[in-house]
Image (cartoon, grey):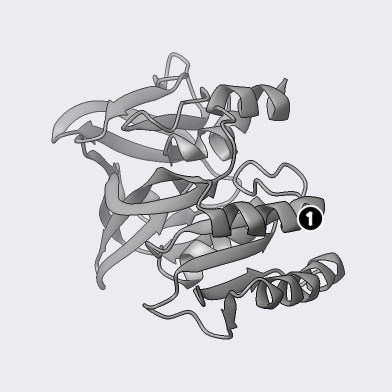
Amino acid sequence: MNKKVFIYANKTENSARIEKNLRNKLMKSGLRVHEEFGEDTELILCVGGDGTLLNLMQDLDFPKTPVVGINTGHLGFFQEVPPEKIDEMIYQYNQGNYTLQSFSTVKGCVAAADGTYRHTGLNEIAVKGLPNYPVHLNISINDSFIERFSGDGLCVATPAGSTGYNYSLGGSIVDPRLHLLQVTPIAPMNSIAYRSFTSSILLPGSDTLSISPCGAQDSKLTVVFDGRIAEYEQVKEIKITLSRKKVNMIRFGNLQFWDKAKSKFL
């Protein structure tokens, strides 16, 4: 067997204890734990909460290697395996009793005066203005102008990310099997002076969302991708689409998405 395994864990005391126990169990089962992730890594074990998984994806540049999430956090939407079921998880993995669930990612291309920058997110990419100030943005879909948005910003979420920041903004929960992006306004202004969409927009996976500042005062923008922040000045345009990168999570049993959604949110 001797499959190469890499463990990615957060820095909490509980996760460190579980990681140590996990290492011992993996070695006894014939799985080799490597200290560094490489192209020959066959399995990634992520110890932590959903935030730890998002950090893993950013740090390892969204690897194609299958990931098993061991939940030491709170919600555990991505992190499926509780610590008390590690033995069962190892056994089922070695027996091949699992399926792969693939998740789409979203990418953003920022064209600024000093260059072009790219970011990818598993959950979402959010575009915001200066803190405590509304921002005015021209919104286009496939180069067709849609509206002049005024508010705190926009959240562009994948189906996987629909249960995260998007959901707290009043966006819809979307089944990950659907190939689409959800654009949800952040504190939109809707009055006689400003007219903006106040509900989410669902875009086919092949569409491109374009965001450009309405004026020079709106050109300093913050791009937040899965909680990580990048600030830009003199932004000309931001284009957001579904990325070709996929995230593969190992799933045990036959728990369906809506069963999980019900158990986590209802």
Q: Position of 55 compared to 20: left or right?
A: left
Q: Residue at x 36, y 77 (%)?
A: 39
Vertical placement of residue 86 versus 56, above or below:
above
User: x, y percentage for residue 144?
Assistant: 14, 29
Please identify the quarter of the rendering in which residue 262 is found: top right
Please identify the quarter of the rendering in which residue 210 is found: top left
User: x, y percentage for residue 89?
Assistant: 66, 53
Q: In the depicted view, which residue is nearer to us: 244 or 5?
A: 5
Name the residue carrying label 1.
83
Q: Residue at x 49, y 72 (%)?
A: 59
Q: In the depicted view, which residue is nearer to us: 68 or 59?
A: 68
Vertical placement of residue 102 versus 265, above or below:
below
User: x, y percentage for residue 129?
Assistant: 47, 49
Quarter of the image with the C terminus in it: top right
Vertical placement of residue 165 versus 233, above or below:
above
Q: Is residue 227 visible?
A: no
User: x, y percentage for residue 60?
Assistant: 45, 71
Q: Residue at x 40, y 65 (%)?
A: 63
